[in-house]
């Protein structure tokens, strides 16, 4: 009996390949359901006189002196006390946006830079505004605002090289997400070879080929993206990961593991935990059980404790069964039940699955919702830092304006998360129930094998690889594991477990 050879995450590994392409998490608003326009500086205040041009000039001086707090206050004062027809209004929006970006208020910066790029009343500012927006989009951001409403729904006219490539790449991504495959690939093909967006475009086309079961073409695209001289670290890693998964599906496990070992992901992240789990499955099918168990125990580190991976219990039980450690195998099954018993009870009770912490956390850490959840956390973090500025921001009302801006966006994101979580938590619940069924079946088969005597002709003798004797000397040091995890050692754990399937009988 083969248990989850592809596993749930391996059966759905194409979805994982597509996940970076689906970060456009928030769908375009339906007709008649337009989101409110992004907040701008308030209309000229009746309580404050219009700021003269000298305020703009002072703000400009502070900006070029890298005094972004003062620059932001003066640019906001100029905007909030004047009509939008005043001289240098667009430049003030631009410098306010960049100042906020430099201070770490990235969402507020995006709102003002959006205004500059969307209105296009000063075409000479447009390329610079789009360059700043490109930087902002590399981190958590308002996908609906910057991707859909700005880059996709706008016609910018002539743009210089890199900026034009950035806009065309994003428009191609929108076509791909909306099902206009030919249009998307045409735009991808039009990107020049010396564009920094070309390798990512090639990778994206490779994913599309894979989705259409054109395996050979997909492999060529992934290799081309991997070896492209302008490919950045992220594109190279995604290409290696795609090729490793293809090799895994073809049961070329040794080659797959070599590629997995070359993938670099941020330490102590969900991405690293997912990579470890894929390495563990690959090592299992190579019958490298010690390495498999070492990886699985690394996933027990506190940094990965919230990572949703019920299959690690299944995989540990399979390793123990393969080595005729039947009682430890059954213990892993009980550990699975203990870990997820309350969640499974909630599923059977048909409660609102969004209220279950395990399902909710898992749903928010995968796919498109992960990007939305990251953006929501960013809103909270940046809103909390508004009070740390004070001074001139309080005098001109910039602090209060930003509080309202962040509160409004947080409310919108919360509504979106609430609506999408229903579907996402249901998918996680179905995955967990599937693993529960696998564990029940494994429990039954382990129970049978406890009492099954090995045929004498199938028994084997211990090999050199089975020798667990610790040498008295040598260049390696051995320690007894005491449940203490060191982050720099997680990737190198080896779990010493003897193979008990030697003699007839296989007694515990």
Image (cartoon, helix red, strand yellow):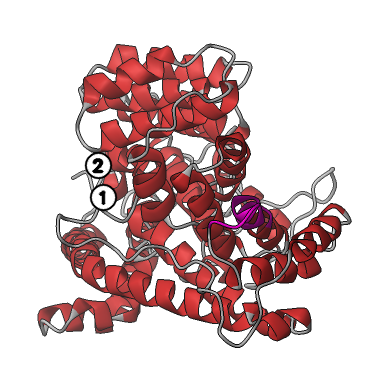
Taking the image as shown, residue 175 lies to the left or right of residue 411, namely left
Q: Which residue is mark 2?
A: 11
Name the quarter where the N terminus is drawn.
top left
Q: Main secondary structure of the magenta part?
A: helix
Taking the image as shown, residue 23 lies to the left or right of residue 405, namely left
Mark 2 crowd level (few <14, some 14–19, many ≥20, 10 Å Cα): few
Q: Secondary structure at mark 1?
A: helix
The boundaries of the magenta stretch are 85-95
Residue 327 visible at all:
no
Q: Check residue 139 for magenta coloring.
A: no
Front residue of this view, candidates 17 and 439: 17
Label ID, residue 8: 1
Q: Secondary structure at mark 2?
A: helix
The spot of residue 362 in percent (x, y) is 35, 66
Q: Are marks 1 and 2 in contact (CB under 8 Å)?
A: yes
The spot of residue 29 in percent (x, y) is 22, 56
In this view, which residue lies farthest toward the bottom?
47
Name the quarter where the C terminus is drawn.
bottom left
Residue at image coords 56%, 29%: 163
- Compared to 263, does 291 lie above or below? below
Label ID, residue 195: none
Front residue of this view, candidates 66 and 306: 66
On the image, which quarter does residue 401 sit in? bottom right
């Amino acid at each position: 009996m083969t248990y989850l050879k592809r596993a749930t995450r391996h059966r759905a590994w194409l979805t994982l390949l597509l996940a970076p392409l689906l970060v456009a998490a928030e769908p375009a608003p339906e007709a008649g359901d337009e989101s409110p326009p992004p907040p701008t500086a308030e209309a000229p205040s009746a309580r404050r006189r219009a700021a003269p041009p000298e305020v703009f000039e002072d703000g400009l001086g502070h900006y070029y002196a890298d005094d972004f707090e003062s620059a932001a206050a003066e640019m906001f004062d100029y905007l909030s006390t004047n009509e939008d027809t005043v001289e240098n209004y667009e430049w003030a929006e631009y410098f306010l946006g960049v100042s906020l970006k430099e201070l770490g208020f990235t969402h507020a910066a995006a709102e003002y830079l959006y205004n500059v790029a969307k209105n296009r009343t000063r075409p000479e500012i447009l390329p610079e505004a789009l360059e700043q927006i490109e930087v902002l989009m590399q981190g958590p951001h308002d996908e609906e605002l910057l991707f859909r409403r700005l880059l996709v729904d706008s016609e910018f006219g002539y743009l210089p090289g890199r900026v034009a490539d950035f806009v065309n790449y994003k428009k191609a991504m929108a076509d791909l997400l909306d099902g206009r495959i030919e249009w998307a690939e045409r735009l991808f093909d039009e990107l020049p070879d010396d564009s920094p967006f070309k390798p990512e475009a090639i990778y994206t086309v490779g994913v599309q080929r894979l989705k259409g079961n054109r395996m050979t073409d997909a492999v060529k695209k992934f290799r081309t993206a991997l070896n492209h001289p302008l490919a950045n670290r992220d594109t190279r890693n995604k290409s290696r990961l795609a090729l490793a998964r293809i090799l895994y599906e073809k049961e070329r496990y040794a080659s797959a593991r070599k590629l997995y070992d070359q993938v670099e992901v941020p330490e102590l992240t969900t991405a690293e935990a997912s990579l470890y789990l894929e390495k563990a499955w690959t090592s299992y099918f190579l019958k490298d059980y010690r390495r498999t168990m070492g990886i699985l125990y690394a996933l027990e580190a506190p940094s990965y404790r919230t990572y949703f991976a019920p299959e690690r219990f299944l995989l540990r039980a399979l390793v123990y069964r393969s080595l005729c450690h039947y009682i430890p195998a059954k213990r892993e099954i009980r550990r699975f039940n203990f870990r997820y018993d309350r969640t499974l009870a909630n599923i059977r009770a048909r409660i609102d699955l969004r209220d279950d912490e395990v399902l909710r956390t898992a749903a928010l850490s995968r796919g498109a919702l992960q990007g939305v959840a990251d953006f929501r956390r960013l809103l909270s973090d940046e809103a909390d830092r508004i009070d740390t500025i004070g001074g001139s921001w309080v005098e001109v009302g910039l602090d209060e304006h930003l509080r309202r801006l962040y509160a409004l966006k947080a409310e919108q994101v919360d509504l979106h998360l609430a609506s999408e979580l229903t579907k996402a938590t249901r998918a996680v619940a179905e995955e967990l129930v599937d693993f529960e069924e696998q564990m029940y079946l494994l429990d039954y088969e382990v129970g049978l094998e406890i009492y099954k005597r090995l045929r004498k002709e199938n028994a084997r003798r211990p090999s050199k690889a089975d020798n667990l004797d610790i040498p008295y000397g040598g260049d390696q040091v051995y320690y007894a594991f005491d449940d203490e995890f060191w982050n720099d050692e997680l990737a190198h754990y080896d779990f010493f477990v003897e193979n008990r399937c030697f003699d007839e009988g296989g007694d515990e």
